[in-house]
Amino acid sequence: MYEVSVEGTFSAAHALHGYEGDCERLHGHNWRVELTVVASALGPVGMAADFRDLKRALGGALDGLDHRNLSADVPAFAETNATTENLARFVAERVAPKLPENVRVARVRVWESAGASAAWIPEES
């Protein structure tokens, strides 16, 4: 099994409704997102997945998030909190349909700060 990762960043705000503490109020982060995919075989050029294609897929998943209030401006978070965990799953679900047939999402890890991250891992991983 081969594993390939790319990263992207964006800046956005969110508020955690129902949370008792500072994070219930609107606040922002410089988010870092790592997309990791796996493939069981290499293609004809010797790559599991082209970094350029993965960066494009990740960039597409992050489109519309930069300089937004995730809790108010992103419809996917209208009914659920824009937590780091939910953001990781959101990105994975947007990326998955854009991957080649032999490549699948292994993990999406999202950092809201240098020392705090959460990951979403599909059950079949």
Image (tube, helix red, strand yellow):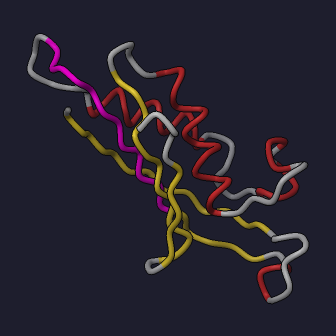
Assign the magenta stretch its main secondary structure.
Answer: strand
Question: Residue pushed farthest bottom?
Answer: 21
Q: Nearer the viewer, residue 43 or 75?
A: 43
- Residue at 79% across / 42% down in the picture? 76
Q: Is residue 121 above or below residue 84?
A: above
Q: How many marks?
A: 0
- Residue at 38% across / 13% down in the picture? 101
Location of the N terminus by quadrant is: top left
Q: Nearer the viewer, residue 104 or 114?
A: 104
The residue range painted magenta reads 32-43
Location of the C terminus by quadrant is: top left
Where residue 122 appears, x then y in whole percent?
A: 51, 39
Task: Give the image quarter of residue 92.
Answer: top right
Task: Give the image quarter of residue 82.
Answer: bottom right
Task: Give the image quarter of residue 21.
Answer: bottom right
- Residue at 38% across / 37% down in the picture? 55
Q: Is residue 111 above or below residue 6?
A: below
Where residue 7 appears, x then y in whole percent?
A: 38, 51
Magenta stretch containing residue 110, yes or no? no
Where residue 84 appears, x then y in whole percent?
A: 63, 62
Magenta stretch containing residue 39, yes or no? yes
